[in-house]
Amino acid sequence: MTVLELKGLTKRFGRTVAADDVSFELREGEIFGFIGPNGAGKSTTLRMIIGALTPDSGEILMDGTPIRKNRHYRQNIAYVPGDIDLWGNLTGEEVIRFFMKVRGYQDTAHKDRLVERFRLDTKKKCKAYSKGNRQKVALICAFLSDARLLIFDEPTSGLDPLMERTFHEEVTAAKRDGRTILLSSHILSEVEKLADRIAIIREGRIIETGRLETLRHITRTEYVVQAEGDLDALKSLPYVHDYEVTDAGTHMRVDNDAVGDFLQALAPHQPSHLESLPPRLEDIFMRYYEDRREQS
Amino acid sequence: MRHFLKLTLDDTWFRILLWIIGISVLTLIVPYAFFGLYDDPAEREVLRETLDNPALIAMIGPVPEGAYTIAVMFSHEMLVFMGVIHGLFSVMIANSVSRKMEDQGLIEYVNSAGITRQSIFMTQLLVGVGMNAVLGIVIFAGLFLTPDDSFTLVGSALYAISTSLFGMMFYALTLVFAQLLPASEWTFGVSLSILLLLYLYRAITDVASPALSVISPYNWLTRLEPFAGNEAVWLLPFLITVLLFGLAWILFSGRDLDDAHLNFTMNKKPRAIGSYPRLMMGSMKILVASWLIGMVLIGASYGSIFGDLDAFINENAFLAESMAAAGEDPVTQFISVLVLITSIIGIIPALMISGRILREEKHGRLEWLESAGIRRRTMLFSHGIYAVIVGFVGVVAAMLGMYGASAGVSGIDMTLGDYMLIAVNYGGAIILFVGLSMLLIGISARLHIVVWFYLLYAFFVNYLGIIIGLDDAWRMATPFHYLAEVPKESIDWAAWSIVTAIGIVLMALGVLLFRRRDVG
Ligand SMILES: Nc1ncnc2c1ncn2[C@@H]1O[C@H](COP(=O)(O)OP(=O)(O)OP(=O)(O)O)[C@@H](O)[C@H]1O
Ligand SMILES: [Mg+2]
């Protein structure tokens, strides 16, 4: 079932087209990764979903109804902004309680558990919080809610690796509870770990959407090869990139749609060891951008 | 340090520029308002006579000796009042480059990026000295070029230098409080209070015992007598600024970032805030409390001169007779002037409160609150209604202060009820201004500044209207032209209803627009 559907969203700020015909949909219970470099239009898109911005054209549907026609749709959403300045003179505890009151939640045990998990000192005033701590407050408020759709804008940008893991665990738990999650990021490895499906946005335009596996046609796989002979001849093949000789062997990235050719070319060199590393989203980007550059 | 200076200026140059333009224009157009109206020395002499009464001495300071040229008249009527404006400019900018930046974590950030404390402080100092110097140069040039012989080189220089130094002094004072107090609200509140209290102190002592007035820096400006006596020696007391800068540096280098020398750790128990209005009121507690106290003080200081006012009128039989002939009671005439000015000042906190919602927007909290189900409509209405309430209560507080301070004066037959009616009368103007503020907020966050310019305009044309009898046409663009001049006149309920209704319509429009516009 489709929880959220974006249809041809466009948003301009003066001459900048921050979002250009953005369309994708979120299915119930999935984690949807939304990735793109800085300034790609991720936040703009998310802020159209929560209603802070009105699209110039296009439509957003929640559970099949346009959000314009249902002002209460926000009850189903919890949103964590990319960067937030909290009220300096309130403590973290007070902010979290305020959110619980406003949204009508009473489960303080759940709150205490989350505060503990995120190791937040809630007695401090918000103005003494670092970016990561402010983010934790917003994250706790979101996980605490019973919203069916959680929207995170670069949630881990201020968190240390340990907290990042806590966040991943909480997101996975939320998914287990049947909640739908929209997660924007430019940290690709994170989305890769968590997301069921992804959309890639660049300069306001969605350039790819789909399951990770199906995006592999535009990915490269990294191979580590050890061989008796000299491998340098491979270096000049059009589908071999980032060729590098190290102690552990020779590294190279190979376009996935040319694996057959690559293996044929490799065989005469009598490889003694062949290891492949899983494709990464960085590689998707790299290849995509290189293709574009060649075209233009 | 150059980087930090650039960063600081990136953040503030636009505001500084607006202030410099605003203050310069405000200062430099006034002489032109005098041309035509007061070309004749005899007319100026008459004006000088009418300004020599306790109500106006309290507002603008004592009347200077010697020939009352256009330039002397200009500096007499402007200097003290512009002191407040120059001071306000410096207090606001000083706070925003010091405690406010620190509250936002910016100072800590640049400090960790290797920019030393010295550089940070030097930057703050440079911004303050620089902006006041530029303003001084513009004003000096503008005054000197004013096409009237009385604007002499020395006089123009003294006027410009003294107002610049006055600004710098409050800049330095604000930096001192930025080290002492734990939050930018406190720094701003305390510095502004001192700026206003010194004004009020001067108002009372100028009327009651002029010798004591010298404690207030405003009186130094008066004693300089630019264009007349040109007593440059009164620039010397401003040397205290150097000490203040030194003190600020000692305090700054002797504390941790994000710490303060005075800390008020209150209520350890977490407060349970359950609604947006409560959140909003909580975040403006200091602001509201200090304004209400300020309003009582303003009312009380004006009230405290009523005795002198009465005595003055008894001494000036001629004035009393001529006013009585025109069907006016001189005392109520003066009171009408003072309550009008007080009410306009009372609009300031109201606009600060309605404009506060823009801070929520700027800090990205508005969209967060909205995503949690709090409606924009609720938020803007909360600010608007609270603004009207505080504005009204502020004027009531000032009236109570005035009533209390003048209770012992015999010649004044104003009941408490009369004072409350004054507050009701000008309550209409408060609603109108808050309405305009909400409309602008509804259109765009950037436009809100317009309502401040409008208030400044309203203040100025009314102020000049009172002092120099500026043509009433200027006031037609403000609600005060239409509202009755209580207590001299009784309330014109038809005009009052129309002003109030326009205000309410503007509020509603503002909310409608605000629901639709992009935020953040
Ligand atoms: N309110 C605004 N006014 C003008 N331009 C804006 C506004 N908001 C965003 N933009 C512009 O729109 C483009 C997209 O910005 P957006 O914040 O959506 O990017 P993003 O993908 O979230 O980037 P980041 O990873 O840096 O957060 C940028 O060029 C940005 O400068
Ligand atoms: Mg973003």
Image: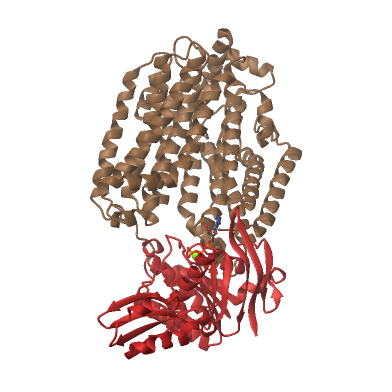
Residue A108 locus on image (x, y percent):
47, 80
Whether residue B208 appears in this view of the structure is: no
The colour one sees for chain A in the rendered image is: red
Q: Residue at x 45, y 75 (%)?
A: A238
Residue B304 locus on image (x, y percent):
48, 32
Q: Which quadrant would residue B231 be assigned to in this image?
A: top left
The colour one sees for chain B in the rendered image is: brown
User: B433 or A59, which lies in front?
Assistant: A59
- Left or right for B233, reference B276: left
Residue A205 locus on image (x, y percent):
58, 67
Q: Residue at x 70, y 36 (%)?
A: B491
Q: Residue at x 65, y 49 (%)?
A: B439
- Left or right for B348, reference B232: right
Task: Say if B22 sits above or below B517 in the image.
Answer: above
Task: Say if A184 sits above or below B251 in the image.
Answer: below
Q: Where's the C terminus of chain B, which quadrant?
A: bottom right
- Left or right for A222, reference B69: left
Whether residue B352 appears in this view of the structure is: yes
Residue B170 locus on image (x, y percent):
37, 37
Task: Say if A76 sits above or below B50 in the image.
Answer: below
